Amino acid sequence: MASINEIIQREVNPFDLVNLKTGNFWTEHQDFKSVVESIHQEAINEIEELLQLVTIDHRSRTVLLIGDSGSGKSYLLGRLKHKFNPKAFFAYIGPWAENDYIWRHVLRYTVDSLIKVPDGEQESQLMLWLKSLSAFINKNGNVWKLLLNNRQKFIKHLKDNYQQAGIYNPEVFFGVLHDLTNPELYTIACEWLKGDDISEESMQALRVKHCIDTEDAAKNILANFGKISTDTQPIVLCFDQVEASVNFDSNSQPIFNINTTIHNDNLKNFLIIISIVKDNWIRCKNYILQSDKARIDRLVSLKPINLDQAESLWADKLQSLHQKANPKPNSPIFPLTQQLLEANFPGGKTMPRNALILGRLEYQKYKILLGNTKVKIPTKHQTNYSSTKTLQNNNQPVITLVNQDSDRIIDISNRERIIAEFQLLWQQEFKKAQSKIGKISLLPATDLIKMVQEVLEALQVQSIKPKLLKGKYASYSLSYQAPDKQDKVGIVWTEDANMTSFFNIMNACQKAIQENICKKLYLIRINTVGNTKLVGYKIYNQIFKGTNNHHIKPNLASVHYLATYDSLVNSAIAQELVLGGNTITLQELQHLTRETKILNKCALLQDLGIIPQQGSGSDGRNGKKDLRSVKDFMLNLVKTQSYMGVATLISQSVAQFPEVEETDLQLLIDLLCQEQKVKIINPKAKLQDRLICFVNK
């Protein structure tokens, strides 16, 4: 086994900030095996107490969870779900794109979460919830099986059992619940419950005449879940990153309206948790109606952690490295010390994020000191620097490294580190988007058009205005000023499968053109536009065939680009995006996006003329592999680490790109060396002992 110093030189910094970003606890796959239990345990106990009360009397309750930036609010939601999922059903509800669609947004996110399968279970939360309804539980325990094969008896049985509950549209709702038990209908039944505008054929299969296409219908369907759940486990609705919702700074009322309605309408069995940054709550609470404040049962504030807890955080991050070392380090936080915490946090308290930032910086400093004959660090950055003050862009620490085998000097500025971290984070988030979004229709039109607006703003497109269309589908559209022109361009994005809805949208487009609202109109749609028998198709032809208007069929990769950027926007607004030791604002994120040109490969933006068409390059055609993104990943990883083991670089690359052969990775390392972007420090050593460093020319 290697010594701890050898391991530190080879391995990736365990405090790497790229791994600190959290979000939807159903898709982020957070690791809670070695969580520091004492951190925020008081807050967890308070929330558990309310959850137990809901379990006992089924009366819905609300927690307002507040904390400073970096206090770990999103991470805590994940801990709650991990710990209490056996006792409750959990729904993650992210920021919404349009206040006129907020109930539909809550319903969609709730059902999306309910169809997830909890750890240790074979079935989704939705099926576990359905089977646990009191109507299916009796002494014999066989009512469920008896009713499965008879849809009408299933519906009648539920109507008889819940006739006093005031169920909305019971014939349809209970019928769709029965369809969940049919494997052939399960998917479209879930789509209907989420509020998708499903096709006429799917509606016939479910025996429904209408989709959930209004706020009132969405609210009532969500209410149905509560009304028939009085004897089941509670449903926990976790509202996270609410600051990133549309117009939150000027109008934070909608989320509290939602909460008050749940209470006023006596919806049962919900525990609502609203997570918000403390500064934002202080800023908006005076504008919240007193009647809405009264519907908050408990305000839970996340407190700073003490230095013992910070030390435990460090020990947790370093544990995997220590386990590989022989002999084992004397201290569980080696190469760090408790004195570092005392010097940087003299008040004895800090936020978890600040402790991790400090740990990363000090670990990196030690790593660079190991095995280098000369290290020049400006005196003012050597000791006692805080993780928030000395790392601003106007006061960047620069570490100058001269490696043992060369006189070449490597300057690693904080700006370079931020850019490299940003590009690494982008690739990680893009990979998550690929795994979460398997088809474009999974996202509602309001979210898609919001994502387009965000990237247009990042690319400094002028005069962006939402709601080009009028009427019901206004939120499916926006307009902007064409680059280098004064012409007004419109965009409409709809993936609704229902052809009646498509007709109505085409009708609204035609009216916009007749009123000369824009010079050019883009329809973005991968879904079918119907056939010659349909009126909507005929209007579509009039608008987009042989005219100045265009129909763009987006590829899935373009949506992954949009969704990746949207995820980072939400994190930036919620003050959860950290790069190079700095909390990145939305404006800084936009600047990074332009500086790195990270959106330039988005085909949709090219088709819109927002960015120039890109050359094909080595795009995988003609049997050639496109390894540019792999090469970028490897270079950026070395940049963030200053130097690391070649074997570690290969293993990290395999984890990010499992489809790439190790021989290709070795060729990419050779190519980076030939380009003098990296250098093997000890090329004659065995592969597991070789170190690679970044070279700044």
Image (cartoon, rainbow, N blue to C red):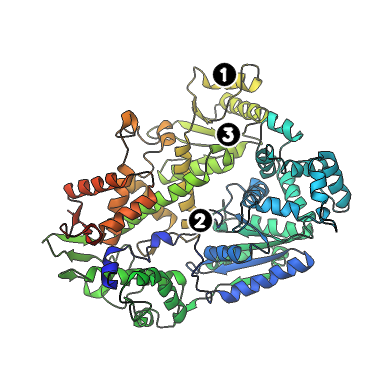
Q: Do the residues labelled 1 and 2 touch (CB within 8 Å)?
A: no
Gap in angstroms between the C-alphas marked 3 and 2 = 28 Å
Mark nearer the viewer, 3 or 1:
3
Quadrant of residue 588 within the rendered picture: bottom left
Q: Which of 509 and 165 is in front in this view?
A: 165
Of mark 3 and mark 2, the one earlier in the sequence is 2
Circle 1 — which element? helix
Q: What residue type is labelled 2?
A: Glu
Image position of 340 with respect to 149: above or below: below
Q: Are marks 3 and 2 in contact (CB under 8 Å)?
A: no
Q: Residues within 10 Å of mark 2 (few under 14, many from 20)?
A: few
> If the image is split into quadrants, where does the N terminus sit?
bottom left
Gap in angstroms between the C-alphas marked 1 and 2 = 45 Å
Q: Residue at x 82, y 46 (%)?
A: 146
Q: How crowded is mark 3: few (under 14 residues within 10 Å), some or many (20 or more)?
A: many
Q: Nearer the viewer, residue 497 or 413?
A: 497
Q: Is residue 596 left or right of residue 258?
A: left
Does residue 565 appear in this view?
A: no
Residue ID for mark 2: 28
Residue ID for mark 1: 542
Q: In this view, does 668 lie to the left or right of 196?
A: left
Rendered location of residue 445, percent (x, y)? 58, 39
Q: Which amino acid does label 1 sit on?
A: Gln
Q: Are marks 3 and 1 in contact (CB under 8 Å)?
A: no
Q: Residue at x 27, y 69 (%)?
A: 2
Rendered location of residue 198, percent (x, y)? 66, 34
Of mark 1 and mark 2, the one earlier in the sequence is 2
